[in-house]
Image (tube, helix red, strand yellow):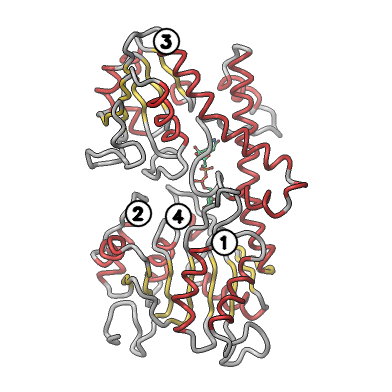
Amino acid sequence: MLTSEPGLTTEGRADVVVVGLGYIGLPTAAVLATTGLKVVGVDTNQATVDAVNNGQVPFVEPDLGVHVAGAVSQGVLSATTRTPPARTYIVAVPTPFKADKSADLSYIFAAADGIAPQLEGGELVILESTSPPGTTRRLGEYLLELRPDLRLDGAPDDAVVHVAHCPERVLPGRIMIEIVTNDRIVGGLTPHASEAARQLYQTFCKGEIHVTDAATAEMSKLVENAYRDVNIAFANELSVISENLNIDVWELIRLANHHPRVNILSPGPGVGGHCIAVDPWFIVAADPENSTLIRTAREVNDAKPGRVVERVLAAMDDFAQPVVACLGLAFKANIDDVRESPAVDIVQRLASAAPHALLLVATPLRTKQDLPSVVSGIVNVERCEMQEAVDAADVVVLLVDHDRFRDIPVESLDSKVVIDTRGFWHQ
Ligand code: SAJ
């Protein structure tokens, strides 16, 4: 490899290699590069690699584009499909769940396959991917299987690889702010690994960096997301109970939240995204007998899209050939991410349960005319501009509270059946 390549030092090594250029890896790579470190991002997707090398971001995240374009043009950030040598490796790959709800760690091991041949000893390997307790140790042991000449502990001499976990905690839509301002938790397999990881994050993180062991760091991330899931489940359960009791849940929550120690979250069409809808299952898998509340919360939130479908189907009954405007597909407001999105689930289920209906889907954050592949190709689903969809509809279903939907004049909803799953027009 040429030493003059962007992202590499004169010794032909990167300061940091980030494996996985998704919602976490790319912002992390860009922020590290902005501090002046030479950063190389690695991704198996050639289109992602090409986009980054052209200074572009292959998904929507506020302010990320400016950072990536700036770092690439200054020659401190580049992308490739093959893992180059580096002083530090950050693994930020997906950890989806398998059919039995246990974590699929194959992307982590694939990242290790790329890293292991490059190790010389003395490097720091950080796992950022959300992982069940014990994964960081398994990653370390896997690296040693591939490289038996190296060690994970002992005197920090040249033969030791330092392995640590530092879970990402940024909120999609606010990633570029939170990546700098949030506190971080760092847990190394050894105190030396923790300290090395702490020093790296200190280069860009203005929050506090809390040091613990690897398993506690892994668990802390899962617990944060399970906490939120349980609280959203409470709000979602209230919404179902309130509907049955003919009570306006939005008013109910607003009033209850006037109590100084009550802060109920917002009900919605369900819980989506790659984190909150997934991570609590890793706790359940780790101790199934004792995670009753966490499992139930998941089930309550997973049942919510079905409730919305029932309401929409009931509303359609008044029309022979109903036209339904479905506003939004993302898993939450003001982003274009459709992973685990309850809105997608609802549109798919409505399309198959009501083949006589026409579903007009408005996705204002997608500039291209095509629908996301998760719903494109369904005969009775069409993409439509938001106002046209509303004007043509008998039933309007608000699935995502994108700010852009504020441009829809409320008077245009007057003659429609409106199902507002987010309380968007109640505020
Ligand atoms: N939601 C509701 N009601 C609410 C809040 C959220 O229905 O009151 C829904 C959203 O619409 C969405 C889902 O929950 O479908 C999750 O959204 P979110 O904004 O709560 O969280 P994420 O998934 O975008 O990001 C979470 C964050 N975790 C916590 O707030 C504890 C973030 O800090 C993590 O970094 C991220 O998961 C992650 O990557 O794990």
Q: Earlier in the sequence, mark 2 or mark 1?
A: 2
Residue flagged by tag 1: what amino acid is it? Answer: Pro
Q: Where's residue 273, x and y in %?
A: 48, 45
- What residue did someone put label 2 on? 63
Asked whether 255 or 240 is in front, the reply is 240
Q: Which residue is mark 1?
A: 167
Residue picked out by circle 4? 177
Label 2–label 1 contact, CB within 8 A: no
- Figure check: 353 above or below 148: above
| Residues packed near mark 1 inside 10 Å, few (<14), some (14 to 19) or many (20 plus) | many
Say which quadrant the N terminus sits in: bottom left
Neighbours of disc 2 within 10 Å: few (<14), some (14-19), many (20+): some
Whether the residue carrying mark 4 lies under 8 Å from ligand 1 is answered with no
Q: Could you tell which of marks 3 and 4 lies nearer the N-terminus? A: 4
- Cα separation, mark 2 vs mark 3, equals 45 Å
Q: Nearer the viewer, mark 1 or mark 3?
A: 3
